[in-house]
Image (cartoon, rainbow, N blue to C red):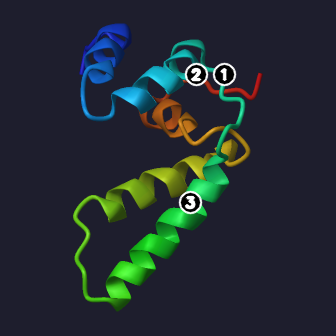
Amino acid sequence: MGLDPSQVLALLADSPIGATAKSKRENIETGTYSPNFKLALAVKDVRLVTEAACEAGVALRVGPAAQAWLEAAEEADLGAMDYSAVIAHIRGAEASLS
């Protein structure tokens, strides 16, 4: 999209997801994703939420997209990294544990 990642993160810092954007900014800017909450656990949790919603007859609009992105990142061997490594996968950027 041609957006400067630093500017995007600065804008997100002042949004409702500001706390997460601030805490994950260094990961995204350095490409280093030491796990605080492993991506593999996020995949498990989003699957559980999606299944529970389906069983309850609740349609999730964003849930399936989040699940697909997280699963694709896990399939790309990012499961041991922090869940924010999904951003690197979406952007096609390098990601490492340290």
The residue furthest right is 98
Could you tell me which secondary element the residue under label 2 belongs to?
Answer: helix
Which residue does the numbered mark 3 point to in the structure image? Answer: 43
Residue 98 is drawn in which quadrant? top right
Could you tell me which secondary element the residue under label 1 belongs to?
Answer: loop
Residue 33 is drawn in which quadrant? top right
Tell me if mark 3 has few (under 14), some (14-19) or many (20+) residues whose alpha carbon lies within 10 angstroms of its own.
Answer: many
| Circles 1, 2 touching at the beta carbon (< 8 Å) | yes
Question: At 26% from the left edge and 88% from the top edge, which residue is drawn?
Answer: 57
Q: Residue 85, percent across and down?
A: 57, 35
Q: What's the mark number on residue 75? A: none
Tell me if mark 2 has few (under 14), some (14-19) or many (20+) residues whose alpha carbon lies within 10 angstroms of its own.
Answer: many
Q: What's the mark number on residue 32? A: 1
Question: How many marks can you see?
Answer: 3
Image quadrant for the N terminus? top left
Question: At 34% from the left edge and 84% from the top edge, which residue is drawn?
Answer: 54
Which of 20 and 5 lies nearest the eye of the viewer? 20
Which of 93 and 30 lies nearest the eye of the viewer? 30
Q: Residue 14, percent across and down?
A: 26, 20
| Circles 3, 2 touching at the beta carbon (< 8 Å) | no
Which of 68 and 41 lies nearest the eye of the viewer? 41
Is tag 3's residue or tag 2's residue first in the polypeptide sequence? 2
What's the distance in space between the residues labelled 3 and 2, CA to CA?
A: 19 Å
Is tag 1's residue or tag 2's residue first in the polypeptide sequence? 2
Q: What's the mark number on residue 27? A: 2
What's the distance in space between the residues labelled 1 and 2, CA to CA?
A: 5 Å
Tell me if mark 1 has few (under 14), some (14-19) or many (20+) residues whose alpha carbon lies within 10 angstroms of its own.
Answer: some
- Taking the image as drawn, is residue 27 in sight? yes
